[in-house]
Image (spheres, helix red, strand yellow):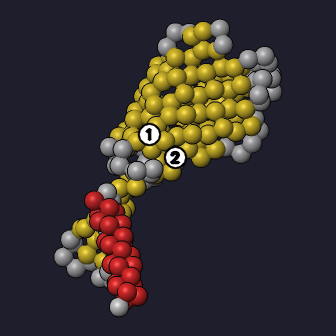
Amino acid sequence: MHARLIGAVVVAAVAGSAATAWAASAANPINKSTGVIAACYATSGGALRVATTPCKATETAVSWQTGAVPLRADIAAGAPDAQLLSKDGLKMRLACYVNPVGVWTAELHVVPSGSADINGSYIPGDELGSEAPTEFGMTAAANADVVPVTVGRSGGGFARAEGEMTIDTPSHIVTVVFHVIANSVTDRCQVAGTATLT
């Protein structure tokens, strides 16, 4: 009798843990580290439900991003470009190189799949301080590779740009906040920031 009672308690504890884990995922269906919401879309009728359980055979799995997407890269001069964003037909990347006259250069590239208006401003500077703000505005054709932000520094220090840009595409308005560095001492370029799609 005693062994049966212990077995029943263990089974109840395991079942309780599974129910608690399922309830926790149902109560918080958003992946907090990525901001992705997973859902199931009924192919007949179009009902949408948060995917707290696997999608059924009659449903299609869908997901979408909430909030800001982090933009981060740290690459050596001359390394392949770092992909920062590839979302709904919009791509962003960081290029890092030393140009022919010896200037370490960091560039933010934007490639929209459709035409886009790109506007913004940034404050350039180096280890000695900041300069006057730089403003930019351009229209990019579909699949055009445009470079709205470039910073460069010759030997012995770093150049930086801190700012914000808005990319207005046919499907989204994207707000990008960025901090870009070209460092001739470490022979590297870095970017940190966020992109928010609305």
Residue in view at x 61 percent, y 21 percent: 160
Q: Nearer the viewer, residue 86 or 70?
A: 70
**Residue 98 pos. (x, y %):** 77, 29
Would you say residue 97 is visible in this rendering? no
Q: What is the three-letter code of the residue carrying label 1? A: Ala
Residue in view at x 60 percent, y 14 percent: 125
**Residue 180 pos. (x, y %):** 59, 28
**Residue 77 pos. (x, y %):** 75, 35
Quadrant of the rendered structure where residue 6 is? bottom left
Residue on which the image places disc 2: 85
**Residue 78 pos. (x, y %):** 77, 38
Q: CA distance from mark 1 to mark 2?
A: 8 Å
| Position above or below: 56 against 136 | below
Question: Where the N terminus falls, by quadrant?
Answer: bottom left
Instruction: State if disc 2 and disc 1 touch (CB < 8 Å).
Output: yes
Mark sitting earlier along the chain (1/2): 2
Question: Where the C terminus falls, by quadrant?
Answer: top left
Residue in view at x 59 percent, y 33 percent: 191
Residue on which the image places disc 1: 195
Judged from the image, the secondary structure of the residue bearing numbered disc 2 is strand
Q: Residues within 10 Å of mark 2 (few under 14, many from 20)?
A: many
